[in-house]
Amino acid sequence: MENRFYVDNLVMSHDELCQLYTLTRERLCQGGFELQSCNSNHVAIQNKMQEHGSLSDHGNKWEKVLGYGYCPLSDTFCVAAVKCDSSAFTKRQILSETARVYDPLLLCLPVSLRGRILLSELWKKGLGWDVTVPPEYLSLWRKLSLDLSELETVSFPRRALSENEAGKLFLFCDASPEAYGFAAYVVQNCQSGLVFAKARVAPLKKKTLPTLELMAVFLALRCLPTLLRNFLGFSSSEIHVATDSQVVLSWLISGTIVSRNLFARNRLKDIQQMSAELGATLGFSPSFLYVSMTENPDDLITRG
């Protein structure tokens, strides 16, 4: 209860969930709190909830869980439904519409990132907040608004990893002239699951593509400690960071950049420092691997 509550929502996955539900309900009752609007993907637990009168009964197969929609029947979840206004015509309106998508795990990033890239392009044009954007950008927005409105139809399996089993963590990195980022996968028992993704729009001050690829690796390692802290009970003996840039891979392995690019050299030093700190904490350092462009799942993020 101390670790799993977010405001007034409790979300749990466990082998002994039936006992935990009963115990949690009893403990909360002792404090004057009544557990309500509960649901589960397990019939036995649903029956217990029915007996206590706490089973959610609203006639909708989707439950609202921390901003996502969860379907107990199929054990899948999706982003909450949002209908974007395709008739938005100013930078302010487009920003307001793209911000309506709530996806903290960023699993729909290949689509939602396009909104940030579009706004970056509008910033480069120097347009005011309430000025009508050029027709070519309005056309891009109309296409994007339709895709954002359809995100609720894309579902993800809830069980991405087991916190009771050791696994391997893979961080796939990629970059394009418009954006850079990574996607994190956990591999257990020959099965993989997408658990998190993150990306940033390329800086307005232009960088070379290898530098952006290096920034993707930097971003992945910077987020890695937070990921490991949030996977309660999960242990990993292998962490791999994969890139499809052979130039960047040579920098990472050799630890040197033969270039006047001071920014890239500083980022490489940061990566080396983070790897050393992770090695001291975990007992092993992340390894850097090559993945071909055609097999890199993070390519979806940077291409959109």
Image (cartoon, helix red, strand yellow):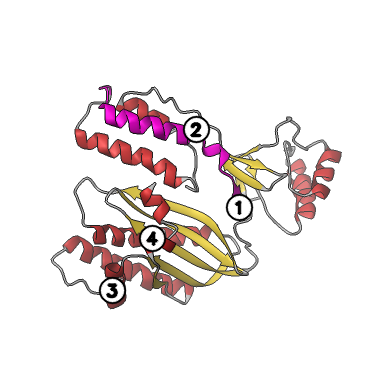
Q: Which residue is mark 1?
A: 3
User: Image point 26% across, 69% down: which residue?
Assistant: 247
Q: CA distance from mark 3 to mark 2?
A: 42 Å
User: Which is more toward the observer, 279 or 236?
Assistant: 236
Circle nearer the N terminus (3, 2): 2
- Could you say whether the residue bearing mark 1 is in a helix, strand or loop? loop
Identified by mark 2, the residue type is Ser
Per the rendering, the mark at residue 97 is none
| Mark pair 1, 4: CA separation | 30 Å
For the residues labelled 2 and 4, say whether their Cβ atoms are less than 8 Å apart: no
Q: Which residue shows up at 27% across the image and 57% down it?
A: 212
Instruction: List the residue tagged with mark 2.
Output: 149
With respect to residue 156, does 184 lie above or below?
Answer: below
Q: Earlier in the sequence, mark 2 or mark 4?
A: 2
Report helix, strand or loop for mark 2. Answer: helix
Query: What residue sits right under mark 3 in the picture?
Result: 250
Residue 175, quarter of picture: bottom left
**Above or below for 230 versus 115:** below
Label for residue 173? 4
Q: Residues within 10 Å of mark 4 (few under 14, many from 20)?
A: many
Which amino acid, mark 3? Ser
Residues shaded magenta: 130-157
Residue 204 can be seen, yes or no = yes
Q: Residues within 10 Å of mark 1 (few under 14, many from 20)?
A: few
